[in-house]
Image (tube, helix red, strand yellow):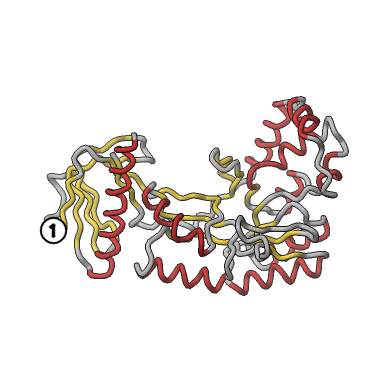
């Protein structure tokens, strides 16, 4: 297994480096006799030739019909080609994480990131995006980013190893501050607002209203004092981790839970576990089904536990591919 992973890492890294070089020089790369995984149809297309020109895929065809081109040829015999993967919930945008995480993403076929809580200013995020686009820095494309999350007073958002820094969130105390936070993050270049657990109802619904007025998406955790249905009706585009669905269900057995969480008084683990186990699975299923009835809801992402509304305007880049064996 370790040998297999090393081979995948070397081959994936090689293709990324080659594609970046081709993107800058206009060189042509051919992946010949490779098996393409058709993820839409669920088929394996063997003996294919994939042509990359200027960093873009220009042809995917059977070997006998592939256009004749010059340039670098990569033998894909025994290898598989899949679309680049997107990780839809990461917290990677910090200097000490970038240099170790970015190569690992590429080695594992992740070519796009949705960062739901950056630790650097949005202006710096834009600089990283430009470096990635130009090939000056190797890493996955930053598809969407929230910048700092938006939370209520008293919450601390400190990353490991930086206990004296608290730059991961904007604190809002009321509706006025909430609206200012939305305007500020949109102006600074965030792709969406991320709301968090400790927001008051006043602040949350002000964010929802201001985001709707500005046609600016908001996503995130469902605050402890808001229900799943309320968040969905307010227009929240994704519910990260699905904690809110569990809280809604547990409240049937422990009515005080929402207020306990909001005040920071978390129940003892054994009591909370007992309440979760007492949840009626049918009630949780009904909550999932309710949210999925929204016309733009794609359903839960199993890896992140996220109900996410797909935005058709965000399409996969033509050069996002991965080769593995």
How packed mark 1 is, by other alpha carbons closer than 10 Å (few <14, some 14-19, many 20 or more), is few
Which residue is painted at 85% across and 43% down in the image?
260
- According to the image, label 1 marks what residue? 69
Q: Quadrant of the N terminus?
A: top left
Foreground of the two, 315 or 89: 89
Horizontal arrangement in the rendering, residue 200 relative to residue 302 (left or right): right
Q: Position of residue 158 (x, y in %)?
A: 66, 58
Q: Position of residue 81 (x, y in %)?
A: 29, 44
Horizontal arrangement in the rendering, residue 64 relative to residue 187 (left or right): left
Q: Quadrant of the C terminus?
A: top left
Which residue is painted at 64% across and 54% down in the image?
219
Foreground of the two, 196 or 268: 268
Which residue is painted at 56% across and 55% down in the image?
91
Horizontal arrangement in the rendering, residue 69 relative to residue 230 (left or right): left
Q: Position of residue 57 (x, y in %)?
A: 28, 56
Rendering quarter of residue 166: bottom right
Disc 1 is placed on an element classified as: loop
Rendering quarter of residue 62: top left
| Total residue callouts | 1
Horizontal arrangement in the rendering, residue 81 relative to residue 198 (left or right): left
Residue 287 lies, with reference to residue 216, above or below; the image says above
Foreground of the two, 15 or 222: 15
Foreground of the two, 111 or 96: 96
Which residue is painted at 75% across and 68% down in the image?
179
Rendering quarter of residue 141: bottom left
Residue 6 lies, with reference to residue 101, above or below; the image says above
Q: Position of residue 83 (x, y in %)?
A: 36, 47
């Amino acid at each position: 297994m370790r040998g297999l992973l090393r081979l995948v890492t070397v081959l994936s890294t090689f293709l990324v480096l080659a594609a970046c070089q081709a993107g800058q020089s206009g060189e042509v790369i051919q992946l010949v006799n490779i098996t393409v995984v058709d993820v839409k149809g669920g088929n394996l297309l063997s003996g294919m030739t994939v042509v990359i020109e200027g960093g873009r895929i220009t042809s995917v065809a059977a070997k006998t019909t592939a256009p004749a081109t010059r340039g670098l040829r990569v033998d894909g015999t025994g290898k598989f080609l899949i679309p680049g993967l997107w990780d839809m919930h990461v917290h990677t945008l910090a200097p000490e994480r970038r240099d170790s995480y970015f190569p690992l993403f590429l080695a594992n076929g992740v070519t796009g990131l949705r960062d739901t809580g950056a630790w650097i200013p949005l202006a710096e995020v834009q600089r990283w995006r430009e470096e990635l686009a130009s090939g000056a820095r190797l890493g996955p494309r930053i598809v969407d980013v929230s910048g700092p999350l938006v939370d209520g007073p008293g919450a601390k958002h400190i990353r490991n190893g930086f206990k004296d820094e608290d730059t991961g969130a904007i604190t809002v105390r009321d509706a006025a501050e909430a609206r200012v936070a939305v305007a500020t993050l949109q102006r600074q270049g965030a792709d969406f607002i991320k709301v968090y657990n400790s927001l008051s109802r006043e602040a949350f619904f002000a964010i929802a209203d201001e985001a709707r007025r500005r046609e600016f998406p908001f996503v995130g955790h469902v605050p402890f004092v808001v229900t799943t249905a309320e968040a969905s009706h307010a227009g929240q585009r994704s519910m990260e981790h699905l904690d809110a669905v569990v809280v809604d269900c547990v409240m049937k057995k422990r009515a005080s839970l929402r207020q306990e969480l909001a005040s920071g008084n978390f129940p003892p683990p054994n009591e909370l576990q007992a309440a979760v186990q007492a949840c009626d699975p049918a009630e949780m299923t009904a909550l999932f089904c309710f949210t999925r009835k929204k016309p733009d809801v794609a359903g839960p992402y199993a890896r992140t536990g996220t109900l996410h509304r797909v935005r058709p305007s965000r399409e996969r880049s033509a050069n996002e591919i991965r080769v593995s064996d």
